[in-house]
Image: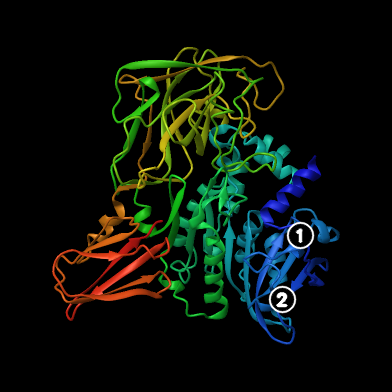
Amino acid sequence: MKKRIITLFMFVILGCQICHSQILNPQVDSIPMRDGKVLAADIYLPDTGQTYPVILIQTPYNRLYYRLGLPLQIGWDIINSPYAIVIVDWRCFYGSVAACKILPERGKDGYDVIDWISKQAWCNGKVGTWGPSALGKIQYLTAKEQHPNHICAVPVVAGSQFEYQEYFPNGVLRTEYVDQLDALGYHMKNTLLQHPYYDAWWQYVEAANMYPEKIKIPMLLIGGWFDHNINLMFDLFDTLVKASDPGVRDLHKFLVGPWSHNSVGKKEVGELEFTEAEGASDSFAMMFFDYWLRGAKNGWPINEKFSFYGISGNKSFLQTDNIKEFKNDNHHDTVSLYLSVNNHLASHPSGNDSILITYDPKNPSPTMGGATLRADLKQGPWNISDHVLSRNDFATFTDGSGFPKLLEILGKPKVDLFVSSDRLDTDFSVRLCLSNGYQSNYKRYIIADGIYRMRFRDGFTVSDTQSMEIGKIYKITLELPFSFYSNHYEDADYLSLVVTSSNYPRYDANLNNGKELYASGDTLVAHNYLYFGEKYPSRLYFDGYHFLGGIEESNSKSLIKTYPIPTQNTLYIDPQKLQPPFHFSIQNLQGKEIVKGEIKNTGVFNLDVSGLEAQVYLLRVSNSNQSSVAKIIKVD
């Protein structure tokens, strides 16, 4: 079983297409380390006799799998690639098992690998790094060592951090996540279970894995809305733009798409398809590498710091934003949806009611989709109706009143719950879903989830924890991962909130006995109550970055006005203060001019944009005295 999980995981994360019979034949070499050991390496060269910039991949998942096809859309066409590719097995893994030692220093190994590469006749002295998950985390460690030939890095669905909340969100062990890591050979579970509370050990490891001041190269971070690392990546990126070396703070960029951990760049994510974002991770990465490693004049610097594919229904569209504005949590008022009678989410609390949620640890609410990692579980936006909502241990509420029109929400959704139990300890879990209707038999696709262990309601140290008082009503707040929601499209889904007391095996199932954590013992059935209404205003709310017609708001600072935003077929250009005649052009974010023309008449001008690809563009208009720029979002 363990070997099967590892094999499945590697094939998914590498995106290998086994159906092809073609096999690449790299040069095989051993790269010496400073301690005299060697790491196994596969070297792919476009054309011997020339020098190339190098993309380095360091993997714990067996370099040999890349012989079935190289990433970054290179595939089997290495001959025509402008890059040499070097893929190295980590110490203690696969071809590098003989180099194993206790507590390997992977950053120093990365430094030694780059040092060796930079001295080879086929290398032009420039090395960039790429890779997802663990292959991304090692890039931060390598960058920390500051080799002069390490020019840039592209960590994908990975942060540098090692945090308590990553493994014990609100005090609850992420069971399937830790089990998967152990199956892959990291053997962390025993150590983690020795530290289920936030203690000095956690303080030490958290500090040791956050080192922005050591980062002196530009980075392109790539994340997914349905990935379990999305919070780590947002927090790390914010730290990099504020505290990394001053010479590169303005050079880091961040792309987020509608992807799960193992589906980055793919069209199919969970049960949905996002055609517009397919391949975007690779195209962004190659544009980044081309600029930093080959000196291409491709307009990369004009891309804003933060680019993301917004989601509306089962569609996605590229947007950009200024990260400083994004981090301003007070930019807009809070939007709240209150749990209400008739299973609705309403704009205002009314009446008073409660729902019994019975929780039996021997039969917990099952995990279906979401930000999972284990290879035998589904990832991303899957319909939870048949598995979770066919039971009798949940409460569900749907956006019955409707959000305001043209609402976009970008940030961390929060949930206030008023709850009680007949046990000394229990859990409350929430799942935020996109729903295509109000009834119980409609599909509900999970987009984010969270959980709360009640003994930790006052904090996560041993001294913070305390048992519940039976029957007492407590208010708890669950902060969900960074998410995006838009109802720009008429067929966009509603929001639903599902409340249970478990989500297993994604999270540990509470035994409800109030005794020692993660120890065997008797299980007790808990009778948990969820309260809502005017007296107990349980709610789903957003007080991060969200806006009504937000992109149009940013355009209002210009001399012209464009609408609708986003647009599908026709763009209306209102010159307002700009006097005709004036010239206009539409450019993509790489600076390429797509459309140009002249407007001679006063009044609103109608421009047919139906032929443009779905993405963000810049509209530039000017007359002899003035000029202005506005952002356009084109959707299909």
For the N terminus, the image quarter is top right
Q: Is residue 184 left or right of residue 340?
A: right
Instruction: Tell me the residue at 73%/48% (across/down).
Output: 8
Q: Earlier in the sequence, mark 2 or mark 1?
A: 1
Q: How is the image coloured?
A: rainbow
Where's residue 121, x and y in %? Answer: 73, 84
Q: Is residue 185 visible?
A: no
Q: Is residue 557 left or right of residue 12?
A: left
Q: How many marks?
A: 2
Name the amino acid, label 1: Tyr
In the rendered image, which residue does mark 1 sit on? Answer: 65
Where's residue 513, x and y in %? Answer: 62, 17
For the C terminus, the image quarter is bottom left
Question: Badge 1, how many Cα within 10 Å: few under 14, some, many 20+?
Answer: some
Foreground: 357 or 208?
Answer: 357
Q: Is residue 605 visible?
A: yes
Where's residue 290, x and y in %? Answer: 55, 75
Cα separation, mark 2 vs mark 1, equals 21 Å
Where's residue 134, x and y in %? Answer: 66, 54
Foreground: 341 or 537?
Answer: 341
Question: Badge 2, how many Cα within 10 Å: few under 14, some, many 20+?
Answer: many
Is residue 473 positioned above or below 595 on the image? above
Is residue 615 positioned above or below 454 on the image? below
SS at badge 1: helix
In the figure, residue 15 lies in which quadrant?
bottom right
SS at badge 2: helix
Name the amino acid, label 2: Ile
- Residue 117 image label: 2
Is residue 512 positioned above or below 616 on the image? above
Foreground: 10 or 342?
Answer: 342
Give the farthest residue toward the right.
98
Disc nearest the viewer among 2 and 1 = 1
